[in-house]
Amino acid sequence: MKKRIDWWDVYFSFVFVLLVFIAYRLVVLSGTPPRMVSIWDAFLMMLATFRLTRLVVYDSIMRWFRNFFEDGKPYTFLGTLKTLVNCPWCMGLWFAVVVSGAYFYAPFLWFFIFVLALSGAATFIQLITNFIGWSAEYKKRLAQNIPPKDETQGGTCG
């Protein structure tokens, strides 16, 4: 059986490569080579990328944005965007380029990167706390022979 090529995936791959190239050129023009990034700054950019990704892909406050692409059918422009905005791995790559480009080329955006990093750290701590709480609740229910809860709630924060 012959597989159908999703040309929109190919198109977005080329757009991504072009975006990376443009971001790299802007970094070179800024005069701050990537090897001069401190470990601390790289960690902050990582947290900012994590937070942006989680915000767009999972958080209910951005559901309105994801809903724009809800009707996207496979092999269409909207379908590809629907897949993209619902994929944390995909959005993480795109946001990594945006955050690192902002870090190098637009120093005035450093404050927003810092705020996103703080929010990312808080989100990560909350996720760990939730996991510990859920794990304790699950073990308690097992010890008391109570069936585990079936919690099928979509998204985060709602």
Image: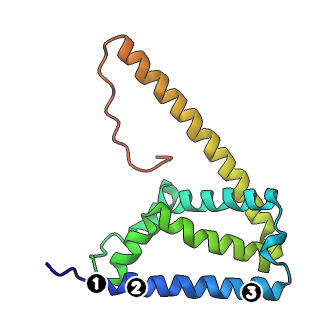
Q: Quadrant of residue 109?
A: bottom right
In percent of the image, x 38 and y 48: which residue is there?
Answer: 154
Between the C-alphas of marks 2 and 3, the distance is 24 Å
Q: Earlier in the sequence, mark 2 or mark 3?
A: 2
Between the C-alphas of marks 1 and 2, the distance is 8 Å
Where residue 39 appears, as percent x and y from the top left, is 80, 58
The circle on residue 10 is: 2
Q: Nearer the viewer, mark 3 or mark 1?
A: 1
Q: Quadrant of the N terminus?
A: bottom left
- 42 left or right, relative to 130: right
Label 2 near label 1: C-beta < 8 Å? yes
- 135 left or right, relative to 37: left
158 to 31, vertically: above or below: above
Q: Kindly identify the amino acid type of the residue bearing the numbered disc 3.
A: Leu
Label 1 near label 3: C-beta < 8 Å? no
In percent of the image, x 48 and y 48: which residue is there?
Answer: 156
Q: Residue furthest top?
A: 144
In percent of the image, x 51 and y 34: which residue is there?
Answer: 131
Tag 1: Cα neighbours inside 10 Å, few (<14), some, or many (≥20)? few
Q: Nearer the viewer, residue 31 or 116?
A: 31
Residue highlighted by disc 3: 26
- 107 left or right, relative to 15: right
Q: Is residue 68 visible?
A: no
The circle on residue 115 is: none
Residue highlighted by disc 1: 5
- 41 left or right, relative to 130: right
Q: Earlier in the sequence, mark 3 or mark 1?
A: 1
In percent of the image, x 17 and y 81: which residue is there?
Answer: 2
Q: Kindly identify the amino acid type of the residue bearing the numbered disc 1.
A: Ile
**Secondary structure under badge 1?**
loop
38 to 157, vertically: above or below: below
Where residue 64 appears, as percent x and y from the top left, is 45, 65
